[in-house]
Amino acid sequence: MLQQFKPLTHRIVCPYRMSETNHSEALILFELSEPYSLQELNIRYKKLLHTWHPARYASLTNNPKKYMEMYKKGEGKTKEIHSSYQVLLDRVDGQDETVTNP
């Protein structure tokens, strides 16, 4: 007998979630200022992920010893980007897709 599942009504919590006190740091990382729109946020998010993707960032060197160092730096920056995105996205949700200073 197949069970029907209810659709998810809650957000998935990012394990790298930043505290509210880091909202200003997230704005700096994304080079945004309030007010910002969901579209602006998504554009910056994709650009940052493209720039800091670990494999892409590490491949900028031909030195095998530096490759892993750069890969780990790219991983760390990617985690920071994800958590900052969640902080900024939380401000957009429920505010007509535009954030203003509360």
Image (cartoon, rainbow, N blue to C red):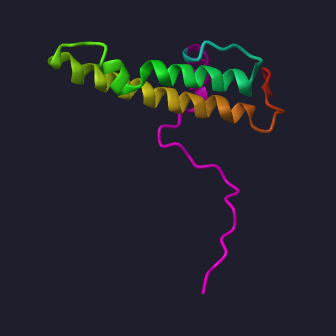
* Residue at figure coordinates x 64%, y 49% from the top left: 11
Q: From what the image shows, is residue 92 above or below residue 4? A: above
Majority SS type along the magenta span? loop
Q: Residue at x 72, y 25 (%)?
A: 39
Q: Is residue 3 above or below residue 58?
A: below
Q: Residue at x 58, y 14 (%)?
A: 28
How many numbered circles does the render carry? 0
Q: Residue furthest left?
A: 65
User: Which of 6/99 is in front?
Assistant: 6
Give the x, y percent position of residue 66. 20, 16
Residue 42 is situated, as x and y percent measured from the top left of the image, at 65, 26
Is residue 85 placed above or below 59 in the rendered structure? below
Camera-nearest residue between 86 and 59: 59
Quadrant in the rendering for residue 101: top right
Range of magenta residues: 1-28
> In terms of image quadrants, where is residue 30?
top right
Q: In the image, is 39 to the left or to the right of 76?
A: right
Residue 59, magenta (yes or no): no
Residue 1 lies in quadrant: bottom right
Q: Picture coordinates of residue 24 (x, y %)?
A: 61, 18
Residue that lies at the very extreme toward the right in this rendered image:
96
**53 horizontally vs 92: left or right:** left
Q: Residue at x 77, y 18 (%)?
A: 35
Q: Is residue 79 above or below residue 9?
A: above
Q: Position of residue 22 (x, y in %)?
A: 56, 24
Q: Is residue 5 magenta?
A: yes
